Amino acid sequence: MGEDQWYIRTDAAGLVVRGFTTAFEQPLAGDILVSGQSGRHFNIPLTSDRGQFLYRINAGTMVTRSQAELDAEWAARPIPKTPDQLRIEQLEQQLAQQSSDMTSLMEFVSDALGAG
């Protein structure tokens, strides 16, 4: 039995998003063989503590992304809304719908009274 090979997979932007060995998975077209590595388990950490991908492919080589690149990506991310913000938006939508419904009702009543 041969030695397990290590592979990485990238996304459309060239970020390394997955690492695996042939002990557990077979490579797909486009996966890249990582030379100089061996062992049954892929043990290169691919994400930072913030969940950002640490490597990208540059001219066919896996390179570490710079801290400036990671910081710019982090600063540009959409900031998730808190549960309170989501609830306020939901209540505002309900209030707007109720206001619209009330306006429609008032117009109906006004038209009905004016026609009688």
Image (cartoon, rainbow, N blue to C red):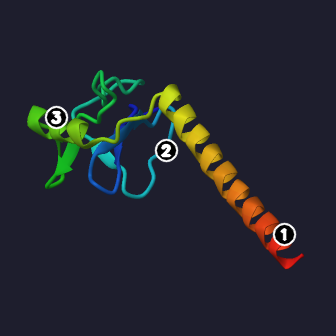
| Relative image position of residue 102 (x, y in whole percent) | 72, 54
The residue mark sitting in front, 3 or 2, is 3
Name the residue: 90% across, 75% down.
Answer: 116
In this rendered view, identify the residue nearer to me: 77 or 30. Answer: 77
Residue 26's disc number = 2
**Mark 3 vs mark 2, CA separation in Å:** 34 Å
Residue 9, x across and y down, in percent: 36, 46
Inspect the image, locate mark 2, and give the three-letter code of the amino acid beneath it. Answer: Gln
Return the mark for residue 71: 3
50 relative to 16, above or below: above
Sequence-earlier tag: 1 or 2: 2
Residue beneath the point at 84% across and 69% down: 113
The disc label shown at residue 113, or none: 1
Residue 75 numbered tag: none
Side of 97 where 73 appears, left or right: left
Measured in 3D between alpha carbons, the distance from the residue under mark 1 to the one under mark 3, in whole angstroms, is 64 Å
* Element marked by disc 2: loop
Foreground: 42 or 47? 47
**Mark toward the viewer: 1 or 3:** 1
Residue 81, quarter of the rendered image: top left
Amino acid type for the residue under numbered disc 3: Asp
Residue at screen point 72% across, 56% down? 101
